[in-house]
């Protein structure tokens, strides 16, 4: 078990990098997922088709395949995902701005994949709002946008929070894959590094890695429980 | 024939197991069973009597051990193993090849899953704690592969200014070695699980170099000479040895003798020319066998 103490800095570094990519991917997926959800419930059929196609593709592909496309397909198309080198963010999340594009590729794949699930979680919330609410809003003369913003989304949010939380927790765990697509030093790749190059026994390293992921996911789960309870009171 | 009978009697005296006799004397090895005279109780005698041997090698290493359409691995490691097996008096077609990726090599020797391992197996002290090495039979070294038009990278020191990016395989010795030269690991080093991904990244210009043992790089250059070239000379020494059980000194001595013989009679060079030598790698002089 000495490895947990001797190599604490390596574990901490891996934790920090995984936290960074998860934080950015969660924000990206929530934004993109919301956009796709709006497409899927919009009154315009072609937009609905776009949203549905997106969800069908990215929800049904394995994340590994999406990562492959991001890490080896984008370069083939001549892109190093430089559009993600956003000036302000670059200074906080240093990996976002490096010449090595694999952090950005991993981020893109996680966002695209998770957004499909975010979309469905949001949509299930919208479906939970009684149809009469939207009809009443429409009969008052609210446009589609106003309807969503003032009537439907505030109510759907309550029903969406818990599934959304599950989606984000799943995403944190899924992020373990990016270490195998060129992101050096994330939590899961740290394990590979310590066991095969460092020669440390696997079990203690695996315990260290598990603790790292639990530190991220357990508090998030607890937060979700709290939100759920508060909603129960409100009802 | 008299010689053979003597050998058979000697073997029968030490074993209850009968030896099937067939044509050829011991100089014509590889044609019969139990046709060699080895010290009683030695690994050589056991293998010779059994007339079969398990050899651990790689199945995915161009030039050294790669399983092709023939269904059997081919390469320099395999040829070296065949030389040893021939000296044991076992026919080539009685070799059972076992795939031994880098991570399992010590384990399969210790557990007795294989009788010997020839799998681009670098001799080092850490490994000597668990197993023993005969050889070396080849001295590889870490090198750097770059795109054909690259002029700025001339050796490992070219990474010290922090601008050039390099790729290797997670957990490998070359990956650890290059970290000594790289200024900032986070911005300069990429690690994948296979060298194929590194090659793609080099071709796609996500990285500027790929580093590992020269023989692996030569395999890639041989396949795509228009795109890649080597940058400078080897900067480490990786002597490849044959892995055997730690306590089996007799077998190790036997393999060392066999290698010395192969160095002298030209079969070592012939094995190289037919396999890894086809990629244009120079062989140089035979390495000195280390009888520690």
Image (tube, coloured by chain):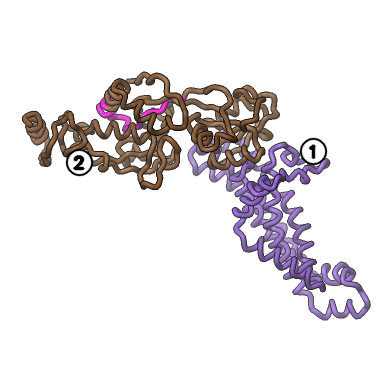
Chain colours: A purple, B brown
User: Which residue is label 2 attached to?
Assistant: B50
* Mark linked to residue A91: 1
Labels 2 and 1 in the same subunit: no
Query: In the image, what residue occupies the spot 87% across and 67% down?
Result: A149
Image x and y of residue A11, in percent: 61, 39
Region rendered in magenta: B238-254
Quarter location, residue B252: top left
Residue B224 lies within the magenta run:
no
- Label 1 lies in what chain? A
Q: Is residue B252 magenta?
A: yes
The spot of residue A80 in percent (x, y) is: 71, 43
Task: Give the percent coordinates (x, y) of residue A235.
Answer: 79, 73
Left or right of B49? Residue B119 is: right
Residue at image coords 47%, 23%? B237
Q: Quadrant of residue B229?
A: top right
Give the residue at x 58% y 39%: B199
Secondary structure under the numbered disc 1 in the rendered image: helix
- The residue nearer to you, when weighing B56 against B72, is B72
Where the N terminus of chain B falls, by quadrant? top left
């Amino acid at each position: 078990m000495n490895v947990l103490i001797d190599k604490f800095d390596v574990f901490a570094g891996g934790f920090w990098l995984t936290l960074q990519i998860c934080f950015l991917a969660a924000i990206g997926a929530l934004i993109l997922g919301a956009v796709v959800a709006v497409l899927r419930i919009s009154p315009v059929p072609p937009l609905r088709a776009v949203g549905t196609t997106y969800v069908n593709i990215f929800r049904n592909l394995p994340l590994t395949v999406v990562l492959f496309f991001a890490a080896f397909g984008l370069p083939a198309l001549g892109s190093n995902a430089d559009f993600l080198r956003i000036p302000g963010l670059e200074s906080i999340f240093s990996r976002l701005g490096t010449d090595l594009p694999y952090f950005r590729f991993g981020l893109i794949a996680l966002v695209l994949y998770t957004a499909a699930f975010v979309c469905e979680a949001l949509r299930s919330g919208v479906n939970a709002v009684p149809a009469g609410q939207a009809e009443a809003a429409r009969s008052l003369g609210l446009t589609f946008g106003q309807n969503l913003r003032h009537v439907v989304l505030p109510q759907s949010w309550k029903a969406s929070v818990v599934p959304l939380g599950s989606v984000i927790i799943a995403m944190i765990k899924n992020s373990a894959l990016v270490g195998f697509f060129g992101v050096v030093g994330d939590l899961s790749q740290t394990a590979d590094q310590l066991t095969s190059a460092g020669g440390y026994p696997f079990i203690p390293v695996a315990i260290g890695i598990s603790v790292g992921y639990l530190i991220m996911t357990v508090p998030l789960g607890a937060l979700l429980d709290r939100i759920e309870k508060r909603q129960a009171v409100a009802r | 024939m008299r010689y053979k009978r003597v050998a058979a009697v000697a073997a029968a005296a030490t074993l209850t197991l009968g030896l099937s006799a067939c044509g050829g004397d011991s100089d014509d090895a590889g044609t019969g069973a139990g046709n060699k005279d080895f010290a009683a109780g030695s690994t050589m005698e056991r293998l010779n009597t059994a007339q079969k041997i398990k050899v651990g090698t790689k199945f995915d290493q161009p030039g050294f051990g790669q399983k092709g359409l023939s269904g059997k691995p081919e390469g320099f490691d395999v040829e070296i193993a065949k030389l040893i097996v021939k000296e044991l008096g076992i026919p080539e077609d009685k070799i059972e090849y076992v795939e031994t990726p880098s991570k399992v090599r010590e384990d399969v020797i210790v557990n007795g899953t294989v009788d010997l391992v020839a799998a681009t197996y670098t001799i080092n002290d850490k490994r000597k704690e668990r197993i023993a090495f005969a050889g070396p039979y080849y001295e590889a070294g870490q090198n750097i592969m770059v795109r054909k038009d690259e002029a700025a990278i001339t050796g490992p020191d070219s990474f010290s200014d922090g601008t050039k990016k390099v790729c290797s395989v997670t957990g490998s010795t070359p990956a650890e070695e290059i970290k000594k030269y790289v200024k900032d690991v986070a911005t300069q080093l990429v690690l994948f699980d296979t060298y194929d991904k590194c090659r793609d990244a080099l071709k796609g210009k996500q990285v500027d170099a790929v580093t590992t043992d020269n023989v692996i790089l030569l395999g890639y250059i041989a396949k795509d000479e228009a795109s890649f070239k080597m940058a400078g000379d080897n900067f480490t020494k990786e002597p490849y040895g044959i892995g055997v059980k730690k306590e089996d000194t007799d077998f190790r001595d036997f393999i060392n003798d066999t290698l010395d013989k192969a160095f002298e009679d030209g079969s070592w060079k012939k094995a190289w020319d037919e396999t890894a030598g086809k990629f244009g790698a120079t062989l140089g002089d035979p390495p000195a066998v280390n009888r520690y």
